Image: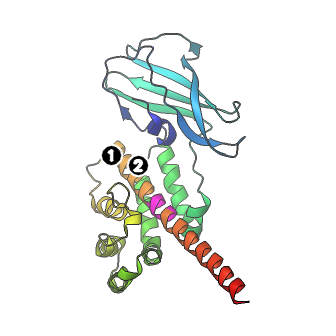
Amino acid sequence: MPDKEFLEAYPLYRKCDFNVPFISDDLPSPSINMFCPNCTSIQTYNMINHYVGYNYVGGYTIINEEIYELQYQCMGCKKFERFFYIKFDVQDKNVFKIGQDPPWSISINTKLNKLLGKNAYLYKYALTCESQSYGLGAIAYYRRLIEEIIDKLLNDILEIIPDSKKPDYEKLLLNVKKSKNAQSKIDIVKNEIPEILRSGGLNPLKIIYDNLSVGLHEKTEQDCLQISDELRTSIIFMVEIILSTQKSKKEFSEKLQKRLKKHSK
């Protein structure tokens, strides 16, 4: 069914399953969190209207295939609106977006752009493929991106490793330098990353490793879109945690040094 994740993150034509024989006037209307250009920040949006085709109805039933327009309004400024055009296929029991205004974003945030540097274009190409539901193409670009940034990423992890475990991790990095591809490099350290990089028991490096290992020749485009989504989410999560931790440590160190200088005078 259309849910928060579907509306916020799914690109066009990526299918979402639903298990009911028809939809009536209880169409889900989850609140979503997306950027508002008026508020210049992430805001909550609520659905204020829904339409069948382009004619509003109070109650409706899907018999075969129907296109719906969902109108969402920012709860911050109460002005900016987002529209989603979704199509239900009752026979195959799936739903997917066929349009979105403003369109699905392929922009890259500042933190990620900082770490990716000259390789940011690969990430943008992958996002472009995802926006058009070309899952296989997206995976190809994410794999190239990981190959390019893996050495820096694994080295940056060293900075957030607890001091007591740094020597062991540094030894692993020596073996990483001897490896020739991203998959083998990740395999060396994937079980040694700090807890701060594990969310809900999930290990983003292991997720990346598993998806680099999977064979794609028998996968559908929908399978590939799921894989590309997991690669992108894991990359972003790791980058944001690493950079925010580095920033916090730097700010703490600078404040402490200022205090020490002040007391020494």
Give 190 or 227, whichever is nearer the viewer.
190
Q: Is residue 68 left or right of residue 184?
A: right
Question: Foreground: 107 or 50?
Answer: 50
- The label number, if any, that marks residue 223 in the structure image: 1
Q: Which image quadrant for residue 53?
A: top right
Q: Do the residues labelled 1 and 2 touch (CB within 8 Å)?
A: yes
Residue at the outermost bottom position: 265
Q: Distance between the residues labelled 1 and 2?
A: 8 Å
The x, y position of residue 113, in whole percent, is 59, 64
Quarter of the image holding residue 88?
top left
Reading the image, the residue beneath label 2 is: 135
Q: Would you say residue 237 sits in the magenta stretch?
A: yes
**At which x and y percent is residue 21?**
31, 18
Give the amino acid type for the residue marked by disc 2 in the picture. Answer: Gly
Residue sitting nearer the eye, 247 or 84: 247
| Residue at 33 percent of width and 81 percent of height | 179
Residue 189 on the magenta span? no
Residue 34, given in percent of the width and then of the height, sits at 58, 41
